[in-house]
Structures are given as C-alpha cells and as structure tokens.
Image: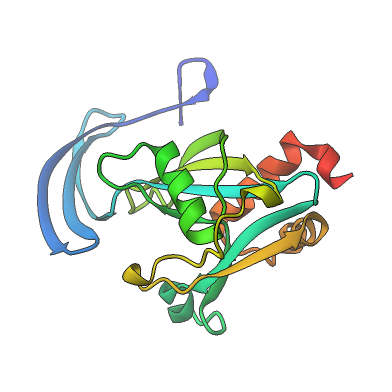
Amino acid sequence: MTTGNDPTTPSRPRARVVGRRRLVDRFIKLDVVDVEVTLPDGSTKVLERDIHDHGKAVAILPFDRRAGTVILVSQLRVPVLLAGEGDGTLVEVPAGLIDAGETAAETALRELREEAGIEVRDLEWVGDVYASPGSVTETVALYLAAYSGEDRVSVGGGLASEDEDIEVLEWPLARFSEALDTGAIRCAKTMALGFALRLRYPDLFA
C-alpha cells in the first residue's frame, strides 16, 4: 500500500511498544515484545513478536589490488550445522560484534588484526544493514579494506579465549567472483561486500 500519489513511499502503520518480557538473558537477549499497531482504517491491533538482541556488528572485506586477492575466513557456525549444511563451516568475511566503548571502525580494525592477521590504515564504509530485521535488532556496518603483504602482522585465526578456531583464506579475485556468481558464497554480508567491491572497483575483475 502507498501513501498519496508517490508510489515509492510505503505506508507505515503507527506502532508503539506496549509490553516486553525477557525470556533469555545470556550472550543473546531474547524478548517477547508486544507492539500496538494502528491500521490504515484507524483500528488498532497488538502483535506479539520474539526479538533477538545481541548488539551491533561489523564485517570487512580485505582486498589486495596488487596481488589480486581477498582475505576470507572459514569457521564453524552452529546454526549452519543445525540447518544440515555439511560440517557447519562457512566461508565469510572477517566480522565481529562491537564492544562497549568502541566505534564501528575501531571494531573493524581490531577484527582484522585478530581474525585475518593484518593491520590496515584505511577503511571504506559501504553501509549499515540489518542482518535479519524480522526478528533480530542487529545492524552490521560493512567495510572494504585495501591491504598489502606489508600489512600482515600475524597468522590471524581469532582468539583462543573466545573459543575461535578460524582458518584464514586468501583467494584470487577470480575465484571469489566465481563463488559469488555460482552461489557458493552462502553468507549474506560476504555476498553484499563482494558485489560492492565489484561495483566500486570493476577494474579489479577485468
């Protein structure tokens, strides 16, 4: 449904939170939220939704223009395992949650050091997106990051203190591009950043 004469303007029902109860308060917060929505005819309706909150995150695609490569990581993702996708490992870009007191950019630089073993100077912001807006409050700040061999400071692999066991992958751009086109990349943030890289730097894929 649209408002007025502008077909690009969606009709947004008025909504307000009228109730909230917490079911889980661990690494994630799981709440049952009651929302009163005013419908186009003026009547109201209360909707009940299960909402998952664990904070905000970042995701970064490092690319080496000179070498023609990108850095990806592979790690166990239990939801992928539960979905029946092989052994549960997923190839994706370095990513992580924003810690208290950090900016998104600071988190991105930290995650590149911890997961990919590189220390870059500049980040190129692509956008902030909702990961799964039907039930999750998380937004993900997406970045591209140019790197070179001189930026490598460690082997990466994540933090043992956080039970991370991450394999660092350096793929040729041609392989990465093919994986995007064939659907071999199953991670949404990785796909978004991969297509952003192709749109912004088409010469890398020529």
| 40 shown above or below 75 | above
- Using the image, determine if residue 147 lies above or below residue 87: above
Image-based side of 73 in relation to 149, left or right: left
- Name which residue lies at 36% across and 30% down: 12
Residue at 42% over, 54% down: 96
Q: Point out residue 60 in the picture as x, y percentages from the top left corner.
A: 55, 48
Q: Residue at x 17, y 50 (%)?
A: 33
**Residue 9 placement (x, y as % from top left):** 48, 23
Hey, which quadrant is residue 174 in on the image?
bottom right
- Please state, as top left, top right, bottom left or bottom right, where the C terminus lies in the image: top right
Q: How far across and down, in percent of the image, does residue 70 sit?
A: 70, 54
Give the image location of residue 197, x and y in percent.
70, 42
Residue 24 seen in the current view: yes
Residue 130 seen in the figure: no
Name the one closer to the observer, 127 or 30: 127
Say which quarter of the image contains residue 100. Answer: top left
